[in-house]
Image (cartoon, coloured by chain):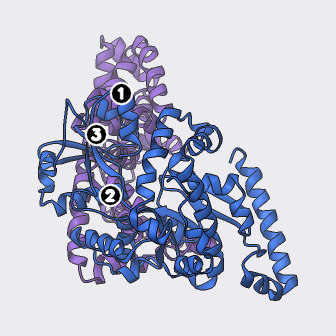
């Protein structure tokens, strides 16, 4: 990361080395070892994160830190910080996996025929919110949006905001949407009345600055869907299902650690993976604690981390439909690999004690 | 460099090219059309060729046929086209605002600079600074100061247009030869008279060069203002479509804005040629 030229050269070298190995071994041994899944080598992969390296990706940090990715057969796992066009990156093969949400991915599948699938989801409930200051905009219900100026970041969030208006029968003409970046300064400056945010991120930041905040949660206002969903390409699912299963295994182990130790999760974000970002320990700790409730629900306790129950899939698809996006659960989700993995290794489905 | 040499050669052309005749109007129009066709061909070749050379994934890199299909063959193509025209109209309006603001400022400042060294030493460094700081970095400041309305569009478009136009126009105004300057002075004319009677007419070629090179600049400014401040028009639609992975739409939007910019550039060139010819003929008569 610090030396892109060097790391690119390294990548190239590794790539040629792997290519050479693959050629000389004619693939025979590789596929044999891939079948038993343990000592297979998948080389280098990367994950396009939906956001910068903060506590939101605690599970990934643990998986890296505790060597779960390595044990699963990955030589290196590179985190590509967001925000960015995750769906594009994964569909074009630039990233092996991505974290996105059901609505953003569903839209791209429906509109662009993107060959993508959600193979698991960290947040069972999405943390999107319209954040406002209690003594200023105080947007507590969808109808409060009318006549207000709302800062929305271009891209997926814009799609979600449009969907929120749509499902609540609010005339888009009655709300002024202005482009903002991800810094909530325009909200604090009074330039906007509401700000599209993560309830576990910007809301905490603004609150810690001493403001009383009001959150209009999307999940409570007609748009429940899974977020921080792991997406990959259909080509990947077809050609290398074992790689995906191994990746999910490492993710599950990472998230088992993350939900049982929010303090270490916050430390990893602040001191290790997000060290260059100057993150606030208080905020990250609070985020790491609160997000446990988004990750571990009653259904998850029963089925395992990252799983998405059929009800939840239907709920996400309904939200999409209400937002005018036509996509079926089969087109959007493929949880067969996760289910296979959890059948083979039921211990991965366990939620750590005390969570 | 190219612009500079054009400007330099333009002034002598005004005096020397007495051979230009009325029949050349058609020739000018035809050569402009020819240039447009060549440019379009180059763009198409580059477009297809670069996608091929860099082996861009089909999902992200759309070709001319994909865009054509998106705009003309799909079920909702008519609605898409209507929407694109709406966006294009807003971008055209914003480009016009920035263009006007920038050109007016350029002319006023250029006159000031030619009339007074003080103005030059006061304004040029500022213009240089504004020019060398990327507009993207200046944007938050401009937005804080001017809000997100027409003022910010005028400011951002104006900044992009101002500098090259200013330099070109100043060069044109200064192209008056000392001898002619002396003639006016000897007959009791003031600096103002020199500017009005001699410098302004001889700066016409430079002025129209400035107009022509400012057309694409005005679009750059408008697109930036739309992306960063107003959230309207093609400038915002492209950014939004990129991050929503609406790839065909991205390409279609880029094609639309490129074509509009190209056509206007060619129009400006045509007008430039015609005006200069007219100017020559007027001198002949």
Q: Chain of mark 1?
A: B
Q: Are marks 2 and 3 in contact (CB under 8 Å)?
A: no
Q: Give the Cα distance between marks 1 and 3.
A: 32 Å
Tell me which chain the residue with mark 2 is part of: B
C-alpha distance separating marks 1 and 2:
44 Å
Labels 1 and 3: the sequence-earlier one? 3
Q: Residue at x 23, y 64 (%)?
A: B85
In screen coordinates, is A109 left or right of A68?
left
Q: Nearer the viewer, residue B137 or B31?
A: B137
Looking at the rendered structure, the secondary structure element under dot 2 is helix
Looking at the rendered image, the quarter that the N terminus of chain B falls into is top right
**A97 w.r.t. A146: above or below:** below
- Give the SS element for disc 3: helix
Residue B269 seen:
no
Split into 4 quadrants, where in the image is the C terminus of chain B? top left
Residue furthest out toward the front = A353
Above or below for B4 versus B248: above
Q: Which residue is mark 1?
A: B199
The residue wearing badge 3 is B153
């Amino acid at each position: 990361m610090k030396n892109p030229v060097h790391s690119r050269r390294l990548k190239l070298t590794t790539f040629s080395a792997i290519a050479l190995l693959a050629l000389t071994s004619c693939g025979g041994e590789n596929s044999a070892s891939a079948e038993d899944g343990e000592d297979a080598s998948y080389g280098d992969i990367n994950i396009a994160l939906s956001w910068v390296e903060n506590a939101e990706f605690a599970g990934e940090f643990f998986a890296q830190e505790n060597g779960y990715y390595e044990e699963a057969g990955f030589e290196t796992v590179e985190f590509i910080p967001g925000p960015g066009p995750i769906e594009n990156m994964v569909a074009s093969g630039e990233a092996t996996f991505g974290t996105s949400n059901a609505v953003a991915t569903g839209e791209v599948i429906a509109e662009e025929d993107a060959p993508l699938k959600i193979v698991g989801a960290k947040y069972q409930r999405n943390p999107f919110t319209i954040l406002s200051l209690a003594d200023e905009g105080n947007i507590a219900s969808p109808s409060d949006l009318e006549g207000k100026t709302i800062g929305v970041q271009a891209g997926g969030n814009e799609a979600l905001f449009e969907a929120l208006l749509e499902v609540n029968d609010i005339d888009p003409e009655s709300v002024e949407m202005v482009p903002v970046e991800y810094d909530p300064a325009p909200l604090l400056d009074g330039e906007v009345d509401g700000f599209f945010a993560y309830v576990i991120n910007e809301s905490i930041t603004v609150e810690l600055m001493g403001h009383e905040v009001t959150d209009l949660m999307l999940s409570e206002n007609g748009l429940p869907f899974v977020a921080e969903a792991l997406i990959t390409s259909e080509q990947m699912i077809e050609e290398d299902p074992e790689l995906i299963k191994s990746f999910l295994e490492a993710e599950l182990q990472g998230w088992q650690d993350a939900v049982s130790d929010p303090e270490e999760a916050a430390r990893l974000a602040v001191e290790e993976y997000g060290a260059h970002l100057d993150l606030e320990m208080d905020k990250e700790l609070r985020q790491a604690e609160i997000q446990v409730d988004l990750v571990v629900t009653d259904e998850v306790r029963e089925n395992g981390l990252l799983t998405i129950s059929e009800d939840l899939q239907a709920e996400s698809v309904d939200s999409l439909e209400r937002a005018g996006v036509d996509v079926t659960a089969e087109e959007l989700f493929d949880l067969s690999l996760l289910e296979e993995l959890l059948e083979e290794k039921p211990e991965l489905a366990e939620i750590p004690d005390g969570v | 460099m190219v612009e500079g040499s054009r400007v330099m050669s333009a002034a002598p052309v005004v005096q020397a090219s007495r051979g230009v005749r009325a029949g050349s109007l058609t020739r000018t129009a035809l050569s402009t059309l020819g240039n447009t066709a060549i440019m379009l061909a180059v763009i198409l070749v580059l477009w297809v060729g670069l996608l091929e050379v860099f082996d861009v994934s089909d999902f992200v890199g759309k070709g001319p046929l994909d865009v054509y299909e998106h705009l003309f063959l799909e079920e909702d193509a008519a609605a898409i086209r209507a929407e694109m025209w709406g966006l294009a109209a807003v971008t055209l309006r914003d480009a016009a605002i920035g263009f006007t603001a920038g050109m007016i400022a350029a002319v006023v400042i250029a006159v000031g600079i030619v009339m007074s060294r003080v103005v030059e030493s006061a304004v040029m460094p500022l213009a240089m600074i504004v020019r060398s700081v990327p507009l993207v970095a200046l944007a938050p400041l401009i937005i804080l100061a001017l809000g997100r309305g027409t003022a910010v569009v005028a400011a951002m478009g104006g900044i992009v247009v101002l500098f090259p136009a200013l330099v070109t126009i100043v060069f044109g105004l200064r192209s008056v030869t000392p001898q002619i300057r002396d003639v006016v002075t000897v007959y009791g004319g003031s600096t103002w008279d020199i500017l009005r009677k001699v410098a302004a007419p001889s700066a016409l070629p430079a002025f129209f060069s400035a107009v022509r090179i400012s057309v694409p600049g005005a679009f750059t400014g408008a697109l930036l203002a739309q992306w960063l401040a107003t959230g309207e028009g093609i400038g915002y639609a492209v950014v939004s479509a990129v991050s929503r992975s609406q790839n065909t739409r991205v390409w279609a939007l880029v094609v639309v804005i490129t074509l509009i910019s190209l056509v206007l550039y060619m129009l400006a060139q045509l007008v430039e040629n015609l005006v200069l010819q007219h100017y020559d003929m007027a001198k002949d008569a």
